[in-house]
Structure formats: structure tokens, C-alpha cells
Image (cartoon, helix red, strand yellow):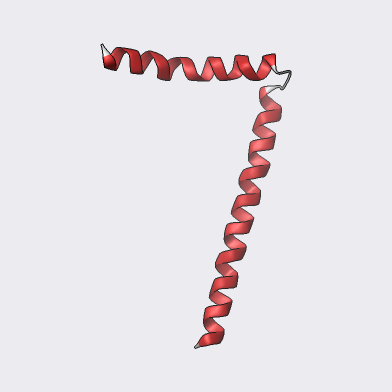
Amino acid sequence: MGNELEGAVKQSIPPVGVTTLTLLNIQLADWVYILTMIYLLLQIVYLGMKILRRFLDAGNH
């Protein structure tokens, strides 16, 4: 019973998400754009911190 319920919940997440976003008057394409920009910003910050850390470590040796 637990596995059936879990499977049903997992299958209903995408349609419920799309319906909720549409009801909030935000199109799915806009959310994809927004989340892509957030992801890119996080990657840029991560890479910048990694380069900065290497630069600072190289100065200490």
C-alpha cells in the first residue's frame, strides 16, 4: 500500500506543479527561464569562489 501511494504521489507532482504555476498566472516557460538564470548565477559564483580559493592558496605557498 505504501509503495502504491508513493508512486501515485510521484506521478502527480509534475501536473500539480504545472497547474499551480498556471493558476498563479506564471507560464511554465517563464519558470524554466527564471530557474535557468538562477542556476547559471549559482554556477558562476561557485566557479568564481573556486578560482579565488586557488589564487589565494597559490599565494600562500
Q: Residue drawn at (68%, 14%), measured in percent from left and top? A: 23
Question: Hey, which residue is sitting farthest right in the picture?
Answer: 25
- Residues 42 and 24: in front is 24
Left or right of residue 57, residue 4 in this image: left
Can you give x and y, in whole percent of width and height, for residue 35 in the image? 64, 37
Can you give x and y, in whole percent of width and height, for residue 19 in the image? 61, 14
Q: Is residue 57 above or below residue 9?
A: below
The image quadrant of residue 54 is bottom right
Number of numbered labels in the structure image: 0
Question: Hey, which residue is sitting farthest bottom in the picture?
Answer: 61
The image quadrant of residue 55 is bottom right
Q: Is residue 32 above or below residue 46?
A: above
Can you give x and y, in whole percent of width and height, for residue 41 in the image? 66, 50
Q: Residue drawn at (60%, 71%), measured in percent from left and top? A: 52
The image quadrant of residue 49 is bottom right
Q: Residue drawn at (72%, 22%), measured in percent from left and top? A: 26
Q: Is residue 5 above or below residue 55?
A: above
Q: Quadrant of the N terminus?
A: top left
